[in-house]
Amino acid sequence: MPRKQLKLQLSLPPLLFFSVLCVGITYPGIAADNNNNNNNNKKPNPNQFPPNPLEIRVRDPLLPRSGRDKRPLTQAELATLATALDRLNAEAAAKLQANDEKGALETWYRELRLRRYLGLLPEVQALSRVGGIAWERNLSEDVQYITKRLQTIQQTQLKPPVELDLLRSLATAFEQVRAPDWSVKVYEQILAEMRQQGNKVQEEALLLKIGELSLSWFDYAKAIGAYQELVNFAQQAGDRTKQVNYLKQLAYLYGKDNQIEKSIKIKQQLIEFYRNQQDFVQIPAMQLEIGSAYEAVGRLEQATQNYQEAYAFAWSIQQYASAGDALRKLVAIQRAQKQINAALETYQVLVKADYLAYNFYGMMNTYDEVGQLYLEYKNFAQALSAFQKGLELAQQLKHRESYFARQIQRVTEQANR
């Protein structure tokens, strides 16, 4: 049967044979038009994701060779390409400046695809630059594309030998696209290398970076581990300033991680450290923090004890402002527990602390609180006296005068009923 058909075709005149043959041929242009028409009639598929622009494989005229030529580019060709890519970067920046965001990104993606030919380090540096711009402009999809490529590159550096310059650029790039967890992974790789080299300076710097980044994405456990090592570093180096700073941060992290007892223990260490250094001014604030930590978990007895210790110590070193802060914390607990007489006694000391600290606004507010407390228990004479003292201060300060005048009128009216 095929032979008969071939014989028939061959017997046809040349022009007619060409017409018959063309019936079975579809020209590329016609096919494209038909496909476009069909595509235009189709509704977009919401589950179909657009192609990653970093993974598009197209022949670029900036490449000096065809895709079939697999030889690496020469140094001269690489230099020419690098210059051309710098021009693309400038072109994209100009488009962005002219509010052509789409055009800028298309140009940058073209640059990023071609940067691969220059090596991983130049590519990562370019990804970092463009990724930072994408993040600043809230282009989440573009940030994801760039982050995915950075993650792929990071996987190539898991086994030795590693390129430290590349790892440092990778860590920075992950920071640019706000992927701190991936940045920490890379910094940990660098840290391991620095430990092998015995580079203590870099080791401390990397631990500090890991601690800060871990805190930024709320990985308190990893941050705590980093700062524990940093405390040891400072102790071994005899650097007391760093030791205090690292201990403070460690206490803060334990608190954020709900390890209250450990946080308090660190703060107690700091108090002893300040005593030994005779840096007494720092102690009341630390005692206040311990009291606040106990109060936050409902251990009011320990909180009260620490507030009292903070007030007494601050008063002994004439730090009356700090004494006032402790007394305010103390009186709040006393009022909450309906310890009225104790609260009134504390208010009397608080007024004196504010006076000695020249905190006249604090005195005025304290008289207001005392007046309200007396008024709550229908002690109109004492309430009136407190509000009148508050008014005198308000007039001197030119602040809240009408408020205290209204409170005096209110007390007088209630007393005369």
Image (cartoon, grey):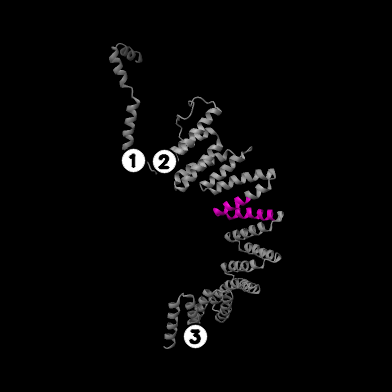
Q: Residue under label 1, please give it.
A: 43
Q: In the image, which residues are magenta? A: 207-234
Decide which of 28, 241 is in the foreground and name it: 241
Q: Residue under label 2, please give it.
A: 95
Q: Check disc 3 and report its element: helix, strand or loop.
A: loop
The x, y position of residue 25, in whole percent, is: 33, 22
Q: Is residue 53 visible?
A: no
Q: Earlier in the sequence, mark 3 or mark 1?
A: 1
The x, y position of residue 32, in whole percent, is: 34, 30
Queried whether the magenta region covers residue 225, the answer comes back as: yes
Mark 3 or 1, which is nearer the eye? 3
Q: CA distance from mark 3 to mark 1?
A: 79 Å
Q: Is residue 407 left or right of residue 191?
A: left
Queried whether the magenta region covers residue 191, the answer comes back as: no
Q: CA distance from mark 2 to mark 3?
A: 75 Å
Q: Residue under label 3, please give it.
A: 379
Q: Check disc 1 and report its element: helix, strand or loop.
A: loop
Most common SS among magenta residues:
helix
Q: Is residue 343 left or right of residue 4?
A: right
Q: Amino acid at mark 3?
A: Asn
Report crowding for label 3: few under 14, some 14 to 19, many 20 or more residues within 10 A (C-alpha).
Answer: some
Q: Amino acid at mark 2?
A: Lys
Image quarter in which the N terminus is found: top left
Q: Is residue 276 left or right of residue 187?
A: right
Q: Is residue 17 visible?
A: yes
Q: Is residue 356 left or right of residue 15?
A: right
Q: Is residue 58 above or below residue 324?
A: above
Q: Amino acid at mark 1?
A: Lys
Q: Which residue is the extreme one toward the bottom?
A: 416
Q: Is residue 321 above or below residue 1?
A: below
